[in-house]
Amino acid sequence: MAGNTTAHNAKVMNRFDLTKRLVAQLKREEAVVGGIGNANFDLWAAGQRPQNFYMLGSMGLAIPIALGVALAQPKRHVFALEGDGSLLMQLGCLATVAMLRPQNLTMVIWDNGVYQITGGQPTASAEAADLVAIARGAGIANSNWAADEADFDALVAASLKGGAPTLIGARIDKGPPAGATERDPVKIRENFMRGLGVRK
Amino acid sequence: MPSWHEIVLSTLKKSDVRLVPYVPDRVFTPLIEALHDDNFFTTFPCTREEEAIGIVTGAWMGGMRAAVLMQTSGFGTIPNALASLAVPCQIPALIFVSERGTLGEFNLGQALVCRTMRPVLDSLAVEHHTITDVNTLAFIVDRAIKQAVAIQQPVTFILSPLLTGGKVFEA
Ligand SMILES: Cc1ncc(C[n+]2csc(CCOP(=O)(O)OP(=O)(O)O)c2C)c(N)n1
C-alpha cells in the first residue's frame, strides 16, 4: 500500500468497478451506506445486499449515518461511500470520527472532482483541496489515496481487519452510474434493519 | 424534587436511550456533564446538528436508541435532515432543544431562529412538546419516547426557560 500516493499521482479509476471490487470482499454481512449522488446508484447496481443503505437525500450524511451504525453494532464492519462534493459539505464529521475512533468504520471517498449528479459542476477538490490530507488533518491517521485498483483492494482488505477508522480516497472518472436506486425510503430502511438483524 | 436535568437523564435511561450526541447549549450544561459522567451513556459533541441527526439515524437502524441535544439555533440547521432522512425513513429521532431566543433573551438573531422552529416542525407533522413544568416532564418524555418508537417518527422536546431557567440577562 502506497501511503505516499498523493491526489495527483493516484490513478483515475471507475466508481462502479471499484464498488464491485469492494462488495466482492464483503463476506461477513458488513453494512454499507451509499451517499447521495452516484455513490448509492452504483452501490445499488453492484447488487442489492440487505446490508446496504441507500441515501435519497440528506447530502453529506453518509459518514454520520455509518458512524451511528458502527456505534450501535461494534462487531459489524461498516462502510460509508461518499462523493467528494458531499464530503466537502460535512467535513466536520471527519473530526468526530477521529475523536471517537470507531474500530469498525471505513470511509471511501469517490473523488471525481465534480458534483456529477447535478450536472458536473466542479468541486473544490478538483482545484485544490486534498480530501485525504484533510482527513489526516482531522485526525484520521489511517487515510490514503488508492494508487490503483490493486491498492484499493488492499486498502479495503486492511481496513476490514479493523483497529482504527480508515479513509480511502479514490480518484474516479466521470463515467455515468451503472443504475438508479429505487426511491422508496421506508423499504430501504426496513430492508436495511432486517439485513442488520434488528428486525425479523 | 429532582431537577429537570436529573429527570431527563433518568427518563432516557429508563427508556434505554444510550447514545446522546449533542452540539452544546449553555442551558444544557448540567445535563451534558451528567451524561458524560454516567457510563450508561455514550455521549459526545458533534460539529453540526445535522451530523447528529445522521448518527442517531444510523444508531436506530443498528438497533440502538439515541437522542440529540441542541439549542434553537441548531434546530435551524436540521430541516433538510429531518425532511429528507428522519421523517421519510421513519426514524424515531429524539430531539431535545433548549429554547433560546425567548423570555428575556438579548439576541435578535436567536429570537428570529426560534420563531422558525415550530412552523418547520408543524409543516413536517413532527410532534413537538414544549415543556414548562418539572412536574409533567417525566410523563411527557417517557410517553412521547414510547409513542415515537411505536409510530416510527421523530419527536421534539422543546425545553422552555420556564423549566430550565434559561439564560439570565441583566438588562
Ligand atoms: C443540502 C443539499 N444541497 C444540494 C443538493 C443537490 N445535490 C444533490 S446530489 C449533489 C451533488 C453530489 O455530489 P458528489 O457528492 O460529489 O457526488 P456525485 O454527484 O459526483 O456522484 C447535489 C449538489 C442536495 N440534495 N442537498
Image (cartoon, coloured by chain):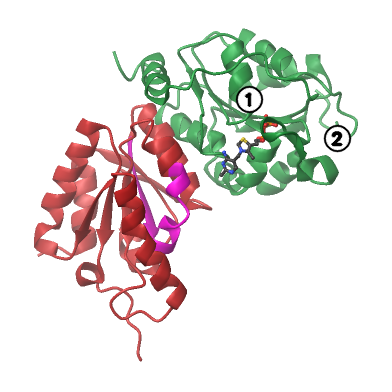
Residue A98 numbered tag: none
Check mark 1 vs ligand 1: CB closer than 8 Å? yes or no: yes
User: Percent x, y for residue A83?
Assistant: 67, 33
**Closest to the observer, B73 or B67:** B73
Circle 2 SS class: loop
Which quadrant does the C terminus of chain A fall into?
A: top left
Circle 1 SS class: helix
Q: In this figure, which residue is indicated by the disc labeled 2? A: A6
Mark 2 chain: A
Residue at left 67%, top 35%?
A118
- State the hue of chain A: green
- Report the magenta residues as a range: B65-81
Q: Earlier in the sequence, mark 1 or mark 2?
A: 2
Whether A83 is drawn above or below A41: the answer is below
Measured in 3D between alpha carbons, the distance from the residue under mark 1 to the one under mark 2, in whole angstroms, is 22 Å
Q: In this figure, which residue is indicated by the disc labeled 1? A: A39
Q: Amino acid at mark 2?
A: Thr
Residue B41 falls in image quadrant: top left
Q: Is residue B37 visible?
A: no
Whether B141 is drawn above or below A6: the answer is below
Do the dots labelled 1 and 2 sit on one chain?
yes
Residue at left 23%, top 44%?
B13
